[in-house]
Image (cartoon, helix red, strand yellow):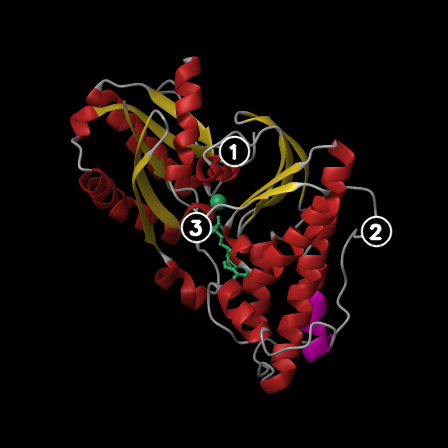
Amino acid sequence: MLFLALETSCDETAAAVFTDEPRILSNVVASQNELHARFHGVVPEIAARAHLRNLLPVIDEAIRQAGVQLSDIVCVAVHNCPGLVGALLIGVSAAKMLSVALEIPLVAVNHLASHIYACRLAAERDIFPCVGLVVSGGHTALFHCEDALTMKLLGGTRDDAAGEAFDKVASILGLGFPGGPALEREAVAGNPQAYKFPRSFVNEPRLEFSFSGLKTAVLYTIHGQNVARSQTPPSGQNRSDLAASFQQAVVDVLAAKCKLAIQQTGLKRLAVGGGVIANKALRSALEAMAQREGAELFIPPMNLCTDNAAMAALAVEKWRRGEFATLELDAEPNFL
Ligand code: KG4
Ligand code: ZN
């Protein structure tokens, strides 16, 4: 049985083909980084237009790389939530069109559930029940994942996502977009103790995040409170110290809240997805924390951490249960 899945929730246009095992046959991702770089962040209107241009060629490429025919596909899956609504709509419309044209069922998949399912795909064994952490440019949230399809939100961010904070602080420091990788490189030469930045809610027993105060603290540390955006960014050792101290604050908060989620739920497994887990300092901190807590840590390879359509292989579970979407399916910006 062959499945085709589409992902257009943010700024990656992606399509994947997988079997019902599930086994991934192709996983094609077209990045829009170059289009958004000069804005230092994803511009929703530009993202939607780029999906419109890129999606059909990306689907063709996924079918070609899998070595199959479109007519072999038995089910089409799509991430319909959460994400940028205009961006999601492109994938949802294309999936509906394929469902009608090929006379095959349509399955709607939650993008955040897919990020956790990427750990299951990579592990090639059951990882549920587990604590799930999604940490990306658009999301920072902890879940109690009963099984692949049943997840309860334990807590999310009140403002910026962790990746968004990396991107914004990178911009303040005069680094490129996406900011996460650039800031991590800058932090290598820096002292993580040089600046004592705030760690929101870190000593409180609630599973919530807030990163906007941290971002503002970095800004005020550099420019003072009467900041003008035209001021020159810091350079040299000071810039490295600022990057390292900011990164350490984010890592400390994420590790502390994952530990709290493990303790509060009693679950001894932590599955992590989203682009920010590329960060080596975060990986090391989570590995050390999981070891201390006697918990198993699941982190997929990078091509399954960042946005992709292969992680939507979760659709196979829905397909088995007969949970199909109708043509009424809509794009939903929020987590449902
Ligand atoms: O999951 P993803 O590819 O897209 C979504 O946002 O859904 O995540 C992208 C985010 C960006 O904010 C990027 O700056 C961040 O992940 N990121 C990193 C690193 N690599 C990517 N953040 C910190 N350190 C990194 N090495
Ligand atoms: Zn994502």
Circle 1 is placed at which residue position?
Answer: 113
In the depicted view, which residue is nearer to us: 271 or 55? 271
Residue 85 on image: x %, y %: 45, 39
Determine if the magenta segment contains residue 19. Answer: no
Circle 3 is placed at which residue position?
Answer: 44
The residues tagged by marks 2 and 1 sit, at their Cα atoms, a distance apart of 28 Å
- Circle 3 — which element? helix
- Residue type highlighted by circle 1: Ala
- Closer to the chain start, of discs 2 and 3, is 3
Residue 319 visible in rendering = yes
**Marks 3,1: beta carbons within 8 A:** no
The chief SS type of the magenta part is helix
The residues tagged by marks 3 and 1 sit, at their Cα atoms, a distance apart of 22 Å
Residue 210 visible in rendering = no
- Circle 2 — which element? loop
What range is drawn magenta here? 216-226
Residue 203 is tagged as 2
- Closer to the chain start, of discs 2 and 1, is 1
Q: Quadrant of residue 309?
A: top left
The answer to whether 5 appears left or right of 190 in the picture is left
- Residue type highlighted by circle 3: Pro
